[in-house]
Amino acid sequence: MAPLRVAFLGPLGSFSHQAAAESFCKVSADLQPQVSFPDAFAALQEKETDFAVIPCENSTNGSVVQTLDLLADRDGLYKDVKVCGEYYLTVHHCLMVRKGTFPGGWADYDGSITKLYTHPQAWGQCETFLTKYLKGVERQDVASTSKAAEIVSKETTERGAAIANRFAAEQHGTDILVENIEDRADNTTRFLIFRNVLDDATAHFKVEQPNLPTSEGEFALGATHKTLIAFTIDHSSPGALANALLIFKAHGLNLTSINTRPSLKKPWQYIFFVECGRTPSDKNKDAVHKALNDLRQVSETCKDLGTWEDQLSARNA
Amino acid sequence: MAPLRVAFLGPLGSFSHQAAAESFCKVSADLQPQVSFPDAFAALQEKETDFAVIPCENSTNGSVVQTLDLLADRDGLYKDVKVCGEYYLTVHHCLMVRKGTFPGGWADYDGSITKLYTHPQAWGQCETFLTKYLKGVERQDVASTSKAAEIVSKETTERGAAIANRFAAEQHGTDILVENIEDRADNTTRFLIFRNVLDDATAHFKVEQPNLPTSEGEFALGATHKTLIAFTIDHSSPGALANALLIFKAHGLNLTSINTRPSLKKPWQYIFFVECGRTPSDKNKDAVHKALNDLRQVSETCKDLGTWEDQLSARNA
């Protein structure tokens, strides 16, 4: 069997690359870096790839608006692209240098690092460590944490260090001086996994979450199925949004998140993204179908963006 | 009477400066630039300023997450700061150069501009114009559109041009070559106006919207009052969010927008920001108060963030 083709936002060594590698670690997969989210979606719509792994939300920074705008699909470019899974990646940052720079590792570090490289968002995520050990060292923003690792891997004149993930260190052959330098141990990015619903070959693939941290003291109710639905309403009609949201409750679907983006048709009108969950049973097996039918009666546009197994449901249900 | 002190996000000549100047144009106001949104909120909490004018949403880019995070007030720093008004500013960009560079204006432009300066977000908003008239010219990102105007106003060696608003041109004395170079004529930023609710002196100020564009063919129902409420719910309880949202409907409050931000207490739990409207009447004069009481029964935390007059209600109600 040919390996599954899995698209992610490059460069190699990015957090998206790591998420793609980990979520497809149990199968033979050909990981395909893309230069943008729209490129990944276009490849999927054209069946040039089998899956796309795209970040949708970070537990500290919130929703990824570029992904919501892609899901909004205002020009109808990706009508067959839907969510088929999710993957949670805990964000761990490492301090790394060119191979062989400090043979004794961090224990022997002599204070000689003169420049730091990383993605702008990572500075704030490692502030405690940087303030304690690398205060005053010049900081250079780069386009990705992976790029930062690449730069220091090739450095010859300056003594630079990069903040990037373990995956980037492996990718670019740098030496990790210190692991887990992030302020928050629970900073996690949720990726959605997409497929083309017209592609029968990928219909039965199940995303696995091999390394999800366990959490004690919470009650496991069994795996929930989550569904993502996008809709627009007539904002001139009072109560229209409340009526739309009521439909989920009426069909026993628990609202787990709501996001909005501008419709871009008219100012101050929105596309709503509602994620809802249910523990599958004989009684609610048509709940999503029925809710969508009802929603179509009260919305202007309404799109089913897919159903998948909630990877956290064993502890958050 | 001493002039009203109005805080906004600097530098001088920013869109926030313009919004502050326009929304307080009918009174004597001392406009006070602040270096960050938290500085503006802190000044208000400490009664070192009377009002703060802060962008909350753009009709094309969506919500300003920094403002939502400020409203979340996770550390309880701004407990007396509430919304008392809103102001809509249509975003118009101009191409401008150092005074006297092209005495004949755009009609005589000879293709000699070698560098463009603006805030990163403005490039995408003026793409059509730039592609048509300034294709291939080097682009330099700067921290604000106002800073771009300042740079070109002082230029001596290069022939640079800035993309900024008319207000920045007046502030820095540049010559406008072309007005309204933005792609979308309807790109509008909504600012919220905040006061300290313990400050009696500012209790009765009414924000005026002097220059709101009129829109034909829509039905005016009279001015709506909008209220912003932030709450968190127990996510482990199915239906909790739906129950909270139902309360607004039960009290005749029309949901006009919903935003969410991470709670930062626990991953995948959110702070919800719900904006709701009502056309004031004898019947619903206690609706907000009653809704808040009911919300407190089903939410973990719940905060009234203020009520104000909807400036668009005459056409969007």
Image (cartoon, coloured by chain):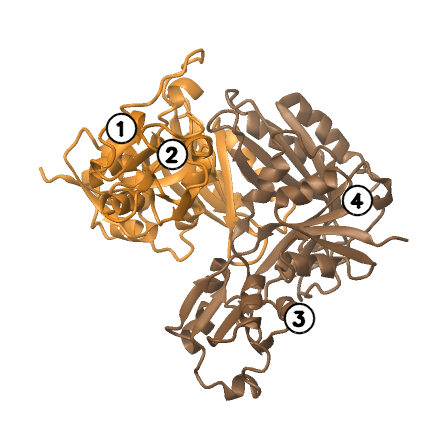
Chain colours: A brown, B orange
Work out which quarter of the rendered image holds the C terminus of chain B and state it: top left
Q: Nearer the viewer, mark 1 or mark 4?
A: 1
Q: Are marks 1 and 2 on the same chain?
A: yes
Residue B48 lies left or right of residue A282; in this view the side is: left
Q: Are marks 3 and 1 on the same chain?
A: no
> Which label sits on residue A280?
4
Residue found 76% across the figure and 46% down from its top: A49
Q: Mark 4 lies on which chain?
A: A
Q: What is the three-letter code of the residue carrying label 4?
A: Pro
| Mark in front: 2 vs 3 | 3
Query: From mark 2 to mark 3, how far is it between C-alphas?
Result: 46 Å
Residue position marked by numbered label 3 in the rendering:
A170
Q: To which residue does mark 1 refer?
A: B105
Mark 1: which amino acid? Answer: Gly
Q: Name the amino acid type tagged 2.
A: Arg
For label 4, the crowd category at 10 Å Cα-Cα, with few meaning under 14, some 14 to 19 and many 20 or more, is: some
> Residue at 56% of width from left, 29% of height from top?
A241
Q: Which of marks 3 and 4 is nearer the N terminus?
A: 3
Check residue B190 in the rendering and tell me which mark sits there, or answer none: 2
Quadrant in the rendering for residue A164 = bottom right
B93 or B216, which is in the foreground?
B93
Q: Where is residue A91 in the image (x, y as percent from the top left)?
A: 59, 63
Label 1 Cα neighbours within 10 Å, binned few <14 / some 14-19 / many ≥20: some
Have a look at marks 2 and 3 and say if they share a chain.
Answer: no
How many other residues sit within 10 Å of disc 2, few (<14), some (14-19) or many (≥20)? Answer: many
C-alpha gap between disc 1 and disc 2: 32 Å
